[in-house]
Amino acid sequence: MQIEMSKFGLILSCLFLTGAVEAHHSAALLYDLSKEAEVRGVATSYELGNPHLRIYFDVDNNGRTEKWMAEGGSRTVLIRKGWDGTEIKPGDVITIRGNPSRDGSNIIHVLYLTLPDGRKLFTEDLDPNQLERRRRQRD
Amino acid sequence: MSRKTTMLSCVTGFALTIVFAVFIVTDPIVSAQPDDDGLGPFLGTWSGIFTTQDNEFWGVEDMVCFAGCSPEAHSHMRSLLDDPANDDRPVNALLGESWGFEAEHIVPILTGEGRLIQQENGPDNDPKLHCQPYGYVREVTNPLPINIRRDGMHLIFEYEEWSLLRTVYMDGRAHPQHQTPSLLGHSVGRIEDGTLIIETARVTPDRYSDFTEGGHSDELTGIERYTVLDNPRRLELKLTLTDPVTLTRPYTLEKVWLATPEVKLVKDRCGAIPGKF
């Protein structure tokens, strides 16, 4: 399904990437890593499982409900960072920021998750800022 | 008890102790010292860049190989970083380009059958999305920590990824002539000049990597060469893959882990995939 940006009753913006990292497999196959988008919706289910974190959520597109899936980092990497699989409950209004799909389908490579209480969680395996810092050190 | 009887008991006891000690020293099973077989340096828990990102050892170009990569892909990323024309491009865009390079890099060495498999494979039909653990190649190069330990004279590789265990037989045996292929196959190992060499066969068909989406047949054989280096202490793998069905020549992947004795493996669990996703 193509994203109709002008009709979206939610935030959706494509930006040049300011720094992102890789999921367990090559996110480059499914997602456009050169862009970022932001989507808000209502969580329907959430899995902190292998190979990746997955969040399923409904998005209201001008009264029409669209099914979305957000894919993030590795289960055990996130567990080491303190995740336990209870971060999201069905019905939570969440905001997802990440890389949009290459083909316009309703999937997104999530980098940041904003919870109903305003907490913003980094959802990937590696810290993008550290990668950029090391790159500059290399110069 | 008379003094003579006591003396006789002492002498008999001493003699039995000597005999028992000689038995222990000469019995190869009981007397084997842990490091005599050269396996000692390889034992322990090792972690890739996902778990050790803070370590200054890692360069940005190493991110390309978080799940193993060809030496050419690693060089490709380094060349992108060295090119001033890319200074304003985000790291992730460069990584994506190098993974694209990896996918293209394998094409010239694929057979016709190998190319067909690559074309049919996609992110949507990846077995891992249906809770099927990785096959041999992806498991051996997976990005999560591993623990290597002894099991008698053999080795156990415990992978955090999918929580899989793999036995590597170190007693000189050959691959069995007939064995049903399995996910991780049948592995035999040996030490040569400080390198741990593991040969694997009898694997079920699976993918070479997420990057390439190429797939191999059950005729695939793999040779892993592990070396341990210092400063920082690390485990380096060179994996050479041969498959007459899908490859016209051997395909090589590399990967590095750092020694992380403080890391405990986390129990892995599959994530169910409801709906069309």
Image (cartoon, grey):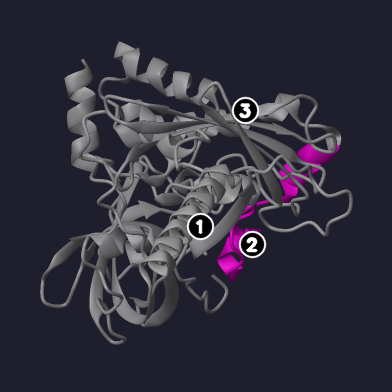
Q: Mark 2 points at which residue?
A: B127
Q: Mark 3 points at which residue?
A: B252
Give whichever of discs 3 and 2 has the lower sequence position. 2
In front: A98, or B8?
B8
Q: Nearer the viewer, mark 1 or mark 3?
A: 1
Q: Where is residue B171 in the image (x, y as percent from the top left)?
A: 67, 43
Q: Nearer the viewer, mark 3 or mark 2?
A: 3
Direction from residue A135 to residue B238 in the image, left or right: right
In front: B102, or B55?
B55
Can residue B17 be seen here?
A: yes
Q: Where is residue B242 in the image (x, y as percent from the top left)?
A: 75, 32
Tell me the quarter of the image containing the N terminus of chain B: bottom left
- The circle on residue B16 is 1
Give whichever of discs 1 and 3 has the lower sequence position. 1
Q: Which stretch is magenta?
A: B113-135
Q: Label 2: state its secondary structure.
A: helix
Which of the chains bears the disc numbered 1? B
Q: Is the magenta stretch mostly helix, strand or loop?
A: helix
Asked if residue A115 is positioned above or below residue A26 in the image, the reply reads: below
Tag 1 and tag 3 share a subunit: yes
Crowd tier of the residue under label 3, counting other residues whose Cα lies within 10 Å: few below 14, some 14–19, many 20 or above: some
